[in-house]
Every structure is written in structure tokens, then in C-alpha cells.
Image (cartoon, helix red, strand yellow):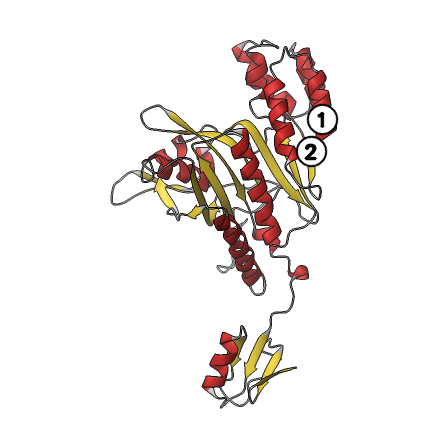
Amino acid sequence: MNSDLLPEGLQDSLPPYAEAMADARRAMMDALASHGYDRIQPPMVEYERSLGSRMDGVQRDHMFRFVDPVSLRTLALRSDITVQIGRIASTGLAAASRPLRISYCGPVLKIRADQLEPERERTQLGAELVGNDSVAAATEIVSVAIEALKAAGVQNISVDFTLPDLVDTLAGSAFPLEASQIDAVRRELDAKDAGGIAALGADAYLPLLYAAGPIDDALKKLTNIDAGGALAGRIKALRTIAGTIGGDIGVTLDPTERHGFEYQSWLGFSIFAEGYTGALGRGGTYAIKRHDGSAEVATGFSLYPDPLSNASQMAKPRKLFLPFGHAPEIAAQMREAGWRTVAALDADDDAQALGCSHILNGDTAETL
């Protein structure tokens, strides 16, 4: 076995991909900062109990776990930074004014990958608005997520909304279900299995499968479902949020979609873009658990910017070759002007072989 091989789902990021990834992350974080989101940097490793208990739906079996030789307690490598935001908001920033705006960017690691998301390590970047899950909060979060992707050069963006607690809302009022049926109905709706729903005796839920598509049409179908007004608030909220999204963004609704929304409450959304496989990010409303048993509402999103480093979309970097014996003060001036310089270490160094686009001639940059 080749000891230099990397484990499945892990890879090195080489030039020019690594540089493009850094540029995309920087542009996106700048966009979040411009909206007042303050950056935090939690550690990669925490106690497994803390990472696995802050939010509903967080799967402990996705985390690498090991015993800390110092405390003899179980530690885990984070698979989701959002959970750490919950801890920080409930401890170090518990006394901070609400709503609390936080941003973050860092690597996450999970034990297993799947066909849609084969990477086991990836960058997670996002923003959380802690202390508010209103329509206004959701509107801000969606718009900021879109702006962050645009800042990284992403075009032809689309947003797909969902209602993660839809079954719970209807099961407790308009379309009653036994407690033992709720999870099964959720699964069949998520699988888009009309036969499975009928077999459960939950025919009232069948129209939800067809209330999907472009936002206006989908909301009309959702409105036509006789739910005794149970969905009126959700429909009004979706109309308001969707109405603030620019006309250059595609907006759709799939009210029963739950994949990736294990801990969201009344609203969830996925963001896609032409030319990229799978979702570039997800977000929505959720609750942060405190150790005293109470909970705090929040709204946020997570983006996964690594796919944005598509080499075919990158311009060749402007690198200025500094011949052997060049004047250091001229080189410093060129760097101040924005050039990336590569200095020759001997007279035989070749500018083109070193990936340079220009060469310094006196005090002038000449194209190679």
C-alpha cells in the first residue's frame, strides 16, 4: 500500500485551486462583515457531549471521536460549526445584546460521505442571527447568503424553500396523526412516495407532494390545500421573504423536503447555482438548547465554498518575475502597487517555468 495516499474523501488543494478558494472565502466573509456579522473562530475539537447535544438532529455518528488523555473524556472533531455557535451564544456571548450577529469560516470533518456530497472534509462558512427567527430575520439571512455568493462571483443563483416542521404543524391540527405515524409520514413525504403515504392512511398529506415548483405556483397550490388556516402564517411569510429576492434569482418551494434540515424549525432553504453539483449551502430557523433546559431561537445559513475554486473560471494570476540582481526598492514598489513578485535566486531561473506572466525590466513590468 502506498503510504502517501490520502484517505477516501480527503484531498490536497494545490495551486491555483487553493488560491481561488482563499479568494472566494475572503470575498464572502467581507460581505458578511459589511452587514454587521462579527467573526468568531471556535476550536476544531470539543467535548463530544457538547457537540452532540446542542441541537436536535445533530448526528453523533458523523463525528470522529477519541478519548482525551488529559481529561479522560470523549472528544470529537466537529462536523458542523453551527452547533459550536450555539455553545458560544449560550456561554461566552450569553450577555451580548440580541439579536446577535455572528459569522464564521473553518474546516469540518465527518466520518462518512455520501454520493451527493462525497467530501469528508470541507470548508463551512456562514452567518447566524441569534435571538430572532422572525420573517424579518429570515429575509435578512437569505439576502445576505445570496450576496455572499455573488461576492465570490457566483451567477445564476436559485433558492429553494422548504417547511421543515410542516408535518408536525398539520398533525397537531388540520390533519391529525398518531404520534407513532409522524416520523413515517415525514419519511414518505421526503421520499416523494405517494403509495407509501396512502398505505399509512395519511391521504390528507398527498396534495403536499404536488405543492412544489416555482414559488408563485407552489404557494397557490399550498393555499388550495384545506388545512383550516394552519398554513396561512407560513404562506404569508414565504410570500414576504420571496418578494424581497431580486428578479435575477430563481425561487422555488418544496414544502416537504427534509434532507439536510434535521434541526431547522419553521423555515429552511437551499441555495444552488448553475454549473455546480448539489447545494452550495443551506439555512433556516432553529433553536439553540441551553443546559438549563431552555432554548433560544436563531436564524442562519451555512455555505460550502470549496466548489467555487473551479480552475476553468480562474484568470491566470499576475505574477511579476524579478530577475537575479534586481533592485529591492523597485520590487517593493511593485508589491505596493498590487503585484505578486517571484524573485530569481540565480541567473538560470526561468520566469515562464515559474508561472510568471510579466518580467521586471528596470522599473517597468513587461508581458512575457
Relative horizontal placement of residue 286, taking residue 93 as reference (left or right)? right
Q: Percent x, y for residue 170?
A: 59, 14
Residue, x 56% and y 29% (percent of image)? 267
Q: Circle 2 — which element?
A: strand
Q: CA distance from mark 2 to mark 1?
A: 8 Å
| Residue beneath disc 2 | 252
Tell me, yes or no, whether the two marked residues, 2 and 1, touch with CB atoms within 8 Å. Answer: yes
In front here: 175 or 181?
175
Q: Which three-letter amino acid code belongs to the residue tagged 2? A: Thr
Asked whether the viewer can see residue 141, the reply is: yes
Tag on residue 363? none
Q: Circle 1 — which element?
A: helix
| Residue 226 vertical position relative to residue 258 in the rendered view, above or below | above
| Residue 201 vertical position relative to residue 146 in the rendered view, above or below | above
Counting residues from the start of the chain, the first of labels 2 and 1 encountered is: 1
Residue, x 54% and y 61% (percent of image)? 18
Most distant residue in the right direction: 217
Asked whether the viewer can see residue 213, the reply is: no
Q: Percent x, y for residue 159?
A: 65, 38
Q: Which three-letter amino acid code belongs to the residue tagged 1? A: Ala
| Residue beneath disc 1 | 218
